[in-house]
Amino acid sequence: MTKYLFLISLFCNTLYLVAQVPISKDSITQLDEVILLDALKKKNAAGITSSDIISAKVFQNYSPVSMVSAVNQIPGVYVFSGALNTNRITVRGIGARTLFGTDKLRMYYEDIPVTDGSGFSSIEQYDLENLSQIEVIKGPKATTYGSNLGGAIILTPKEALGRSTTFSNNFTAGSFGLLKNNLSFNHYNGKLRLGLQYGHMETDGYRQNSNFERDGFLLNTSYQLSGKDKISLLVNHIDFKAQIPSSLGATAFAEDPQQATFTWQVSQGFEDNNTTLIGLNYAHRFSEKLENSTSIFYNYLDKIEAAPFGIFDEITKGFGFRTRFSGALNFLEKASSYSLGAELLKDEYDWDRFENLWEENNGNGSLKGAQIGRNKEFRSQFNIFGTFLMPLTKEFVAQLGISLNKTTYDYRDLFNNGVENKSAERNFSAIVLPSLNLEYSFSEYQKVYANISRGFSNPTLEETLTPDGIVNPDIAQETGINYELGTNLSLDQRRFNINLSIYQMNVRNLLVGERIDEDQFVGKNAGKTRHRGLEVALSYSWSISKNVQLVPFVNYTLTDHSFVEFIDGDANFSGNQLTGVPKQRRTSGIQLRLFDAFYWNTTHQHVSAIPLTDSGNLFSERYTVFNTRMGYQKKLTDKFIIGVAIGVNNLFDKVYAQSVLINTQGFGGREPRYFYPGDERNYYGSLRLGYRL
């Protein structure tokens, strides 16, 4: 109740502040945020580097609770979601072998890296309602964003549309005790751009022991100091606590997918996260042909996780900078462009481990016991990057990119002494990662492109440990070469859009995580994989009449990912399908819009069977899930707008596994736990109020 009183108080105070701000006469009067945000999508990928951008038009297909469904609409990208706080993003099969969390790609919030020093990113820390767009660069061609094998994801927060001052509040309630509120204030007067968002969400969850509660505050502001200088400040604070139901074995999943794993339920396993990101950016235009953008940033994470096998108390403190120069020049009498930059991230990761005495706590869940570990990691990544774009002819353009990465780990065991002490350092050699993009334009909206690029993935420090806990100096970085051909075609007066791509990525030094205990994994380089795939995105905008628009779309992914060479002890898995990757995925739907006021969007997602073991003797079941959402938006006055929406997830109440683990083992005679059940059919409704001065 206190939080909702706070929201009402903030509402009233914001209205008062808004009333004091003078507003320019050229304010945008069109209040349809979905159309505007989709039209104002901006590309962050350098030059002709291909990328996929989803914005409000895609977000409107799904519930505002999570961005997982929206991201899964992108061909080649699949998010395994075990819970609101348990997500694993895979891109073209890269990352599928990671057991928990998202690695092997880089994530940015605006132009600030939010991937930690060990390579992990947490998309669940960000509120979909605060974002204007999500951009995904698939594969290592993202030279200016790290050249990781999985590519890069860039999250862009919302800002005021044109010269305007607006206030909006969106309240959502639904099944499983869902309550979500997002309060937003945006102002732009030509110099000052100010965005403030406060969000609260809570839900009991579908499964046992799956309560989730999150509060978040976002400040995104900039000031145009002059025609050449702009300064920006970004502050994002998230505080969330989530219970953990964990995965289920096949028997438990078939009997009751709603149940939590027994030990996680009786110990009331949970994680509690408090994280803050602060970034300061200064942009300067030296001339019409040269500009620079430089950011410094600091992030802080305080996390406690209570698992049946231990309680972990973790603090991560990171800082760094990112700078990029962009310019234009004449080269061989050709109007060319270039970018040069560097990025440094250093973080310090402190993690202590304690016994969990839940069995002695009289049914009251986790209880911190004696300390059994104290550790500190210093992690550093330094990237230098550059691109050069030159037109070879009027229609044919080439872009050369190159980046260099240097990674170091320094692990200190602060608990054990003498021969038991496992402190060690790992200093990876600098790695050079070139990229070549080619693009041929038949017209402004009909293009074909090609890419060849080299990428890498670092092992985490934990993956470099031997079963005895000693750093293994023989663990190498994964490296791969990506080959890609694609099209970006808009036909029939840009109503029919066709995006096709085919690719092959050859990965060497495949990192394999082996579970040697319930809470311990080690890594090793085990061979080579080949990632082949076809990605298709089709959409058609059909204006049946002046007031009726129908937009059908189909996004399809076909993969042929396999082990080229993979020998694990006496077992030879060469030629087998890559574990954790579905062979086919399809997302299709229809968006109906009437009188610019009513919309009805229905989507379906199909995922084929996923191999769960390297031997290929066990697969998950394929599934198809339908979602639908409809809404109505009414402009009551020139300044006030109201909108309502209702939606149904998993329309036909399909029982399915929304996430899986691979190569898991049962311990203590228990069944291996492969499956994270998806939610049963559930409902939600939203009320949106908007006010513009």
Image (spheres, helix red, strand yellow):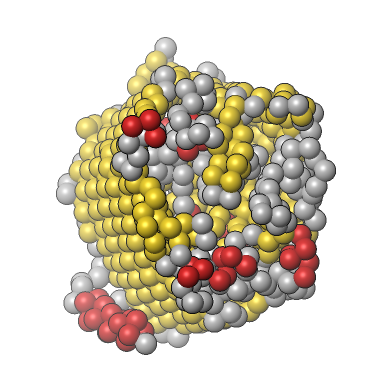
Q: Is residue 252 left or right of residue 120?
A: right
- Where the C terminus falls, by quadrant? bottom left
- Left or right: 520 with respect to 227? right
Question: Residue most toward the right?
Answer: 617
Q: In the rendered image, which quarter is residue 18 located in?
A: bottom left
Q: Position of residue 460 (x, y in %)?
A: 47, 36
Give the residue drawn at x 76%, y 59%: 250
Residue 447 visible from this viewpoint: no
Which residue is at a point 54% across and 82% down the rendered structure image?
177
**Is residue 509 shown to the viewer in this render?**
yes
Q: Residue 346 occupies which quadrant of the picture?
A: top left
Tell which of 391 and 292 is nearer to you: 292
Q: Residue at x 58, y 50 (%)?
A: 518
Residue at (55% x, 55% y) in the render: 87
The N terminus lies in quadrant:
bottom left
Give coordinates of residue 441: x percent, y percent.
60, 31
